[in-house]
Image: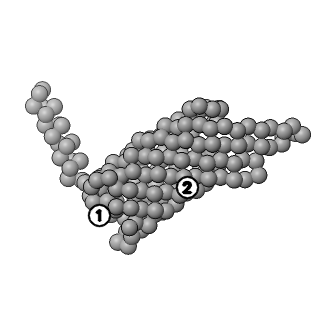
Amino acid sequence: MKKLILSAVMLVGLAFASNAQEISKNALGLRLGDNDGFGAEISYQRALGSNNRLEVDLGIRNNDHYDSFKLVGLYQWVWNIDGGFNWYAGVGGGVGSYSIDKKHNDNDFESSGTYFLAAGNLGIEYNFDIPLMLSLDIRPELYFGDDFRDDNFGPDIALGIRYQF
């Protein structure tokens, strides 16, 4: 049994080591999705090693009844699938602020506050031969601190386009 466990651990370690790919040192672009009105986020990625990186996203939203911002930081691990395809997973957190002001049936409703969030991240990306990267990911978020949402959970699915340098 010990040999079986040791063999399994060695195979998993070998798989992660052999799938590592050098990732771009920097990437800057947009993450386009929707979670409570955040339609677009400015996204920056910074490589921390050959297969891990830091991602920082800033989303700002302003419409007739809802103003908000959200800043999220994620630590990500990146593994090569084949060619230019990578998949990645990460964890992180963030902070946000919101202000709601709307009228409904001649009643005014106002609310504002700040919140914290914990986030996970899972996605797939493609690195083109030119310095362009496309990604599709999901970032489930748990909200803490204020009554930002009734259920304190938001799945954030987005398409990313980034310039690598």
Where 162 falls versus 61 (above or below)?
below
Label 1 to label 2: alpha-carbon separation: 28 Å
Where 13 falls versus 63 (above or below)?
above
Tell whether 117 sits left or right of 113. Answer: left
Q: Which residue is mark 2?
A: 41
Quadrant where the N terminus sits is top left
Tell whether 120 sits left or right of 41. Answer: left
Residue 83's tag is: 1
Going by the picture, which residue comes out furthest to the bottom?
130
Colour mode of the rendering: one colour
Identify the image quadrant of residue 20: bottom left
Going by the picture, which residue comes out furthest to the right?
106
User: Crowding near pointer 2: few (<14 within 10 Å), some, many (20+)?
Assistant: many
Residue depicted at 69% across the width and 48% down the height: 67
Q: Decide which of tag 1 and tag 2 comes sooner along the chain.
A: 2
Residue depicted at 54% across the width and 52% down the height: 58
Mark 2 residue type: Glu
In-front residue for pair 14/76: 76
Residue 104's tag is: none
Residue depicted at 31% across the width and 59% down the height: 23
Element type where label 1 sits in the image: loop
Tell whether 76 sits left or right of 63. Answer: left
- Residue 29 visible? The answer is yes
Q: Position of residue 28 (x, y in %)?
A: 46, 62
Tell whether 88 sits left or right of 93. Answer: left
Q: Position of residue 125 (x, y in %)?
A: 40, 58
Residue depicted at 87% across the width and 37% down the height: 107
Q: Position of residue 115 (x, y in %)?
A: 59, 37
Q: Is label 1 or label 2 in front?
A: 2
